[in-house]
Image (spheres, grey):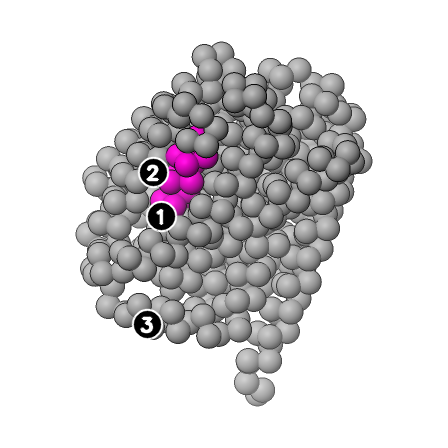
């Protein structure tokens, strides 16, 4: 794999850390700003909506820039957003900082996926995309547990200062390692025209509902562990690290499987994710079984990512950049739906296992959309 993919992974590590870090710090943030746990959980939904809303417009605005220049600009925006979060005097300002960082997230992974796919032979595109997303998964193994520990020991603001430093390192990596990129030759009209294809919308729908179960569970992992499983708060970073190990493994496995067959990879990974969501609900009171299950849940979670991202590139052939950014938005719209729906079940008094059951229902919806996408794709294949 080209060295440039590792540069993309460095920035992805910083972005992944700021995306996931809030999950382990909900109690601290809620206590500092005197809000409820579900209200603090909206910082997850707000970030996810920022990715979904901000990615495609930023991609369009930067459509005439070279892709390397676009990546650098987005990393600067990411750093500014995390500075605002670190300095936030109120819950609303923290939400604004998260939202600004999320704008950079959506466009960065959209543009970065196209750059990664263009650096390798066509038959290795999914693996190249998986390599970039390895930075995102490693954030859960290293960045999130370390950031959670820092936040618990020195205050949650200290964690965001660490994220700022990671963002600066990512910016330097892109400068040094990503080769110069030509300016895009396609027009914005051509990029927009790809959304006339039913296959593109079905691919986006698969991403929304196929990935929504992940954040339905993970957003509330701290209260599930401490409130149902009887874990101490200090165990949360350890379990989050194991979840992150699962993400790394699942991402690499998903890339290899998607290089062989994209749609079967999607069916299998989303089905496994749905079954494991049910398992999380059933074993949440057993600490050993919960740790094993949440690690496997991580494997299934990111086994979905390379095939889902590759599928939208295939569906939008000839004009992939905007569709790729839109699919990153779709991942995060799924995040927002999952965390918001799970928060509603807690507010309704259904308990801390309710998010896992919510995740299972969302996974079934993802399988239904995937089935429709598969039927649509088969209808487009000429008979021989």
Q: Quadrant of the C terminus?
A: bottom right
Question: Which of the two marks, 1 or 3, is nearer to us in this view?
Answer: 3
Q: Where are the magenta residues, as a range?
A: 94-105
Q: In the depicted view, which residue is nearer to us: 140 or 350?
A: 350
**Residue that badge 1 annotates:** 108
Task: Specify the quadrant of the image occupied by residue 300.
Answer: top right
Residue 221, visible in the rendered structure? yes
Asked if residue 53 is positioned above or below residue 342 in the image, the reply reads below
Question: Residue at label 3?
Answer: 189
Q: Earlier in the sequence, mark 1 or mark 2?
A: 2
Mark 3 packing: few (<14 Cα in 10 Å), some, or many (20+)? few
Write down the residue under mark 2: 78
Q: Taking 269 as reference, is 254 left or right?
A: left
Q: Position of residue 313 (x, y in %)?
A: 44, 63
User: Which residue is rendered at x = 58% and y = 87% of the image?
Assistant: 383
Q: Main secondary structure of the magenta part?
A: helix
Q: Does 382 lie within the magenta span? A: no
């Amino acid at each position: 794999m080209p060295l440039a993919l590792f540069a993309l992974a460095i920035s992805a590590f910083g972005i992944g850390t700021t995306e996931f870090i809030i999950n382990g710090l909900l109690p601290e943030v809620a206590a500092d700003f005197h809000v409820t746990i579900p209200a603090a959980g909206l910082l997850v939904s707000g970030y996810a909506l920022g990715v979904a809303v901000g990615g495609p417009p930023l991609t369009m605005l930067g459509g005439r820039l070279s892709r390397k220049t676009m990546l650098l600009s987005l990393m600067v925006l990411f750093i500014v957003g995390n500075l605002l979060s670190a300095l936030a005097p109120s819950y609303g300002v923290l939400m604004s900082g998260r939202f600004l960082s999320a704008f950079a997230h959506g466009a960065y992974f959209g543009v970065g996926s196209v750059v990664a796919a263009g650096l390798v032979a066509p038959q290795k595109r999914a693996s190249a995309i998986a390599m970039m997303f390895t930075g995102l998964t490693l954030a859960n193994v290293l960045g999130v547990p370390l950031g959670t520990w820092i936040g618990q020991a020195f205050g949650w603001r200290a964690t965001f200062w660490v994220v700022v430093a990671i963002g600066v390192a990512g910016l330097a990596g892109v400068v040094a390692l990503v080769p110069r990129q030509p300016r895009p030759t396609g027009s914005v009209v051509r990029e927009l025209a790809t959304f006339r294809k039913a296959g593109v919308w079905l691919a986006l729908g698969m991403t929304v509902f196929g990935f929504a179960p992940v954040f339905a569970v993970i957003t509330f992992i701290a209260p599930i562990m401490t409130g149902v499983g009887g874990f101490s708060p200090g165990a949360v970073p350890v379990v989050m690290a194991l979840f992150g190990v699962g993400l790394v493994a699942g991402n690499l496995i998903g890339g290899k499987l998607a290089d062989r067959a994209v749609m079967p990879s999607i069916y299998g990974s989303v089905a496994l994710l749905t079954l494991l969501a049910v398992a999380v609900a059933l074993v949440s009171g057993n600490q050993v079984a919960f740790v094993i299950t949440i690690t496997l849940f991580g494997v299934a979670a990111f086994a979905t990512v390379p095939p889902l991202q590759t599928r939208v590139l295939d569906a939008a052939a000839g004009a992939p950049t905007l569709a790729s950014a839109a699919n990153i938005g779709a991942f995060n719209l799924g995040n927002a739906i999952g965390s918001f729906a799970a928060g509603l079940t807690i507010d309704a008094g259904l308990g801390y296992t309710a998010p896992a059951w919510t995740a299972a229902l969302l996974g079934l919806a993802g399988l239904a959309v995937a089935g429709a996408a598969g039927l649509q794709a088969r209808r487009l294949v000429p008979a021989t």
